Image: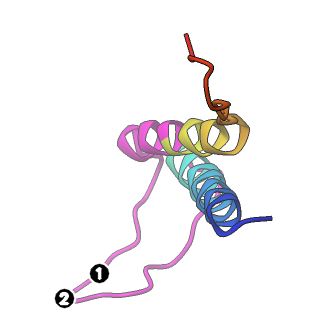
């Protein structure tokens, strides 16, 4: 395996994992306490449509990164 393929797999896996977490949090199926607080942080109560949408986009982007294969062109042949 080359470095690019490994990096693509890692990025795709992280996007899928974060996307799944954000979907679950946005749908109010998972609740996690705030990790880094600057001021008076309060955990969100209830679902968040914004995080649900961001999670779906991140999850689908991660799947796309994992499943898309690049075609190599042979010298002398054109890709169409």
Q: Residue at x 58, y 65 (%)?
A: 31
Find residue 54 and report its horizontal and vertical position in percent.
42, 43
Q: Which residue is mark 2?
A: 39
Q: Considering only vertical position in the picture, is 68 above or below 29? A: above
Q: Which of 45/27 is in front?
A: 27
For residue 78: magenta?
no
Q: Residue furthest front?
A: 76
Separation (CA) of disc 2 from disc 1? 6 Å
Find residue 12 and report its horizontal and vertical position in percent.
63, 53
Q: Is residue 38 left or right of residue 34?
A: left
For residue 33: magenta?
yes
Residue 7 position by quadrant: bottom right
Q: Residue at x 36, y 41 (%)?
A: 50
Find residue 40 and report its horizontal and vertical position in percent.
22, 86
Find residue 1 and report its horizontal and vertical position in percent.
80, 64
Residue 34 position by quadrant: bottom left
Q: Which of 70/79 is in front?
A: 79
Tell me, yes or no, whether the two marked residues, 2 and 1, touch with CB atoms within 8 Å.
Answer: yes
Q: Residue furthest top?
A: 80
The magenta segment is: 28-57
Element at badge 1?
loop
Q: Which residue is mark 1?
A: 41
Q: Is residue 56 left or right of residue 74?
A: left
């Amino acid at each position: 395996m080359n470095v690019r393929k490994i990096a693509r797999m890692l990025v795709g896996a992280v996007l899928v994992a974060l996307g799944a977490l954000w979907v679950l949090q946005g749908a109010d199926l998972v609740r996690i306490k705030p990790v880094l607080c600057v001021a008076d942080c309060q955990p969100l109560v209830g679902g968040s449509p914004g995080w649900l949408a961001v999670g779906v986009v991140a999850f689908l982007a991660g799947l796309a990164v994992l499943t898309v294969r690049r075609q190599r062109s042979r010298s002398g042949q054109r890709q169409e």
